[in-house]
Amino acid sequence: MRHNQLPNCRSDSIGGEARMKYGRKFLVEPGSKVRLAGIDPGFKDKHESHEGAMPELNKNAARIANLQYLLYADGSRSLLIVLQALDAGGKDGVVRHVFSAMNPQGTSVFGFKQPNAQEAAHDFLWRAHLRAPARGQVVIFNRSHYEDVLVVRVHKLVPKDVWSGRYELINDFEKMLWDNGTAIVKFYLHISPEEQLERFRQRLEDPQRHWKISESDYSERELWPAYIEAFEEAIEKTSTKYAPWYVIPSDHKWFRNLAVSEIVADTMEGMRLRLPPAKVDIAEIRRKYHAAAEGKRQAGQPQSK
Ligand code: AMP
Ligand code: MG
């Protein structure tokens, strides 16, 4: 199959070093160790401000819009984007800002909550598989099957021998999706505890956002080190050639959006999407068009008595 020769991103397919800047910088190389404490969540590259990053943000949005049109038209591939973060890490913000560049007709977002009764009665990958993208479609997982090695591990909802067996099952599942034509890209939005608290403060002060606050925000925050440990192991064990993880510095929302949008656009370019050939004889259709246009012109002329 055409896509089987390709990793998700290839610099040679998209014109070299200038692009893939953040794709290279934030990629978790398969098999490498992850130490989140060594990654600065406040990183913002050469940009001073949101305004300064606007031209690149706009360029990425335009690239994503064009590429999603191609993905939809091509109809042979699909794209799965996984977003994971601690509370207030910016998953909703990424969905809003980055994916507003896409046509809703070919995109959907699925938020993973505590499994409902039907979901809980199945294997942990069932609900993820159910929502995986069809050909031509982009699906965003806001949280994902990774919750089953994150919250489930931290809260000891299943024994260790159960959650620790899941990394391999996840890798097999993602490989199967990839073999079937789905490109997969996974983002961990990396924020500092200080930035999380600042975002909680902003939520408290803005009545428009009170609905987002939950008691668990504060109890989960107490478990920060356990979550970091769980994230590190999950990312290490499941960053693969066919479904790579990217750790995105996310204290600055605009920088997070810039990095994610660039990596999404690069991933889609690496898919080598093509417009399919026309299903009809265009020369023949052109003749029909001219005949119709001519007929319309004659019908529109005043009738002679
Ligand atoms: P939110 O993203 O704020 O809407 O919250 C969704 C909640 O559902 C989070 O607290 C998640 O940790 C929780 N959740 C998602 N998947 C699972 C799962 N498989 N098991 C337990 N809790 C989950
Ligand atoms: Mg929440």
Image (cartoon, rainbow, N blue to C red):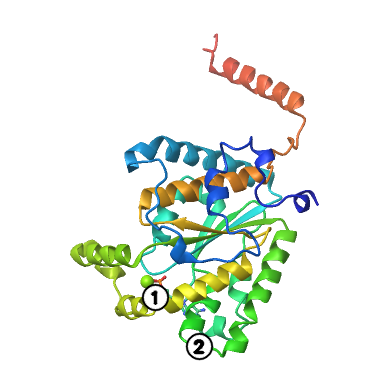
Q: Residue 43 at x, y = what percent?
A: 40, 51
Is 109 placed left or right of 217 in the picture?
right
* SS type, badge 1: helix
- For disc 1, the neighbor class at 10 Å (few under 14, some 14 to 19, many from 20) is some
Judging by the rendered image, the residue that carries numbered circle 2 is 157
- Depth-wise, is mark 1 or mark 2 nearer the camera? 1
Asked whether 46 or 141 is in front, the reply is: 46
Residues packed near mark 2 inside 10 Å, few (<14), some (14 to 19) or many (20 plus): few
| Residue placed most toward the observer, 213 or 286 | 213
Q: Is residue 192 left or right of residue 266?
A: left
Identify residue type, mark 2.
Answer: Leu
**Distance CA(mark 1)–CA(mark 2):** 17 Å
Counting from the top left corner in percent of width and height, residue 12 is at 69, 39
Q: Position of residue 290 (x, y in %)?
A: 67, 19
Residue at image position (47%, 79%) is 151
Q: Which of the numbered marks, if any, corresponds to residue 143? A: none
Q: Quadrant of the C terminus?
A: top right
Verify CB contact (< 8 Å) between mark 1 and mark 2.
Answer: no
What amino acid is at disc 1? Trp
Helix, strand or loop at mark 2: loop
Above or below residue 220? Residue 275 is above
Residue 292 image-quadrant placement: top right
Whether residue 145 is visible: no
User: What residue is rendered at 56% in x and 90% in y?
Assistant: 159
Which residue extends farthest top? Answer: 304
Q: Residue furthest front?
A: 38
Residue 214 as seen in the image, left or right of residue 249: left
Look at the numbered disc 2 and say if its residue's Cβ is closer than 8 Å to ligand 1: yes
Reading the image, the residue beneath label 1 is 224
